[in-house]
Image (cartoon, rainbow, N blue to C red):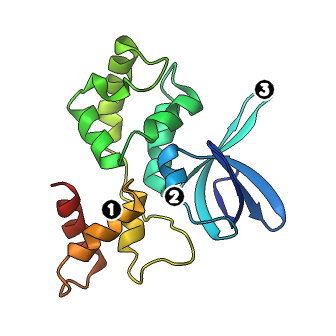
């Protein structure tokens, strides 16, 4: 099973990229959120992957961090969801915000996704409530070049914030805070305003 890829982006489309890994091109489906945070074509990228194998299908889904992959796998295991809907759900916003809305049983969370009505939304929320608390804290995989020295910007991007917002929030963090974890916490407070 393919669970991790590292290579160079050679093509970007609306729902997927082609990643060149040692002269082999992998078509990897990504969420809208992940696609919006990718580096330019020809830049290196690392992804956690989920390989969906069915009778006549073999699709790869990519994630910048392991938490997103875990969330996707939990969603994919819910009856009636499937990988494409799971990918759409995972692109609804930062993972922490999605967790918050699920734990508060906000059934409007899925209103933008076609095929998920009120009844299915409640089923998904009920199944996720217990499981979502267990999603572990994991490091973010980020573009291999152009990352900040401490990785705070890439960590915020991995949580689902656009690069511009992450940069702006980190610019507001007091300069005397050097620890990456503290920078991220301060930036999250700023982004939460």
Q: Position of residue 156 (x, y in %)?
A: 35, 63
Which image quarter: residue 83?
top right
Q: Is residue 84 above or below residue 134?
A: above
- Distance Cα–Cα, label 2 vs label 1: 18 Å
Q: Is residue 42 above or below residue 118?
A: below
Q: Which residue is mark 1?
A: 165
Report the disc number at residue 64. Answer: 2
Q: How many marks?
A: 3
Which image quarter: residue 118?
top left
Which image quarter: residue 58?
top right
> Dot 3: within a 10 Å radius of its alpha carbon, few (fewer than 14), some, or many (20 or more) residues?
few
Question: Does label 1 or label 3 sit earlier along the sequence?
Answer: 3
The quadrant of the image that shows the C terminus is bottom left
- Distance Cα–Cα, label 3 vs label 2: 28 Å
- Distance Cα–Cα, label 1 vs label 3: 42 Å
Q: Residue furthest right?
A: 23
Q: Residue at x 51, y 67 (%)?
A: 142
């Amino acid at each position: 099973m393919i669970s991790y890829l590292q290579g160079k982006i050679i093509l970007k489309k609306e729902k997927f990229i082609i990643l060149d890994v040692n002269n082999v091109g992998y078509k990897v489906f990504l969420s809208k959120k992940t696609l919006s945070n990718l580096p330019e074509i020809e830049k290196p990228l690392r992804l956690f992957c989920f390989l969906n194998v069915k009778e006549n299908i073999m699709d790869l889904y990519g994630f910048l961090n392991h938490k997103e992959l875990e969330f996707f796998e939990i969603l994919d295991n819910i009856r009636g969801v499937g990988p494409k809907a799971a990918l759409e759900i995972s692109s609804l916003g930062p993972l922490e915000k999605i967790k918050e809305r699920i734990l508060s049983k906000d059934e409007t969370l899925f209103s933008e996704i076609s095929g998920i009505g009120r009844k299915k939304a409640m089923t998904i929320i009920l199944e996720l409530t217990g499981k979502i608390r267990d999603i572990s804290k994991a490091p973010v995989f980020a573009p291999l070049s152009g990352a900040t020295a401490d990785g705070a910007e890439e960590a915020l991007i991995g949580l689902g914030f656009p690069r511009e917002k992450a940069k702006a929030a980190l610019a507001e963090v007091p300069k005397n805070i050097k620890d990456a974890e503290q920078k991220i916490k301060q930036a999250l407070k700023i982004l939460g305003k």
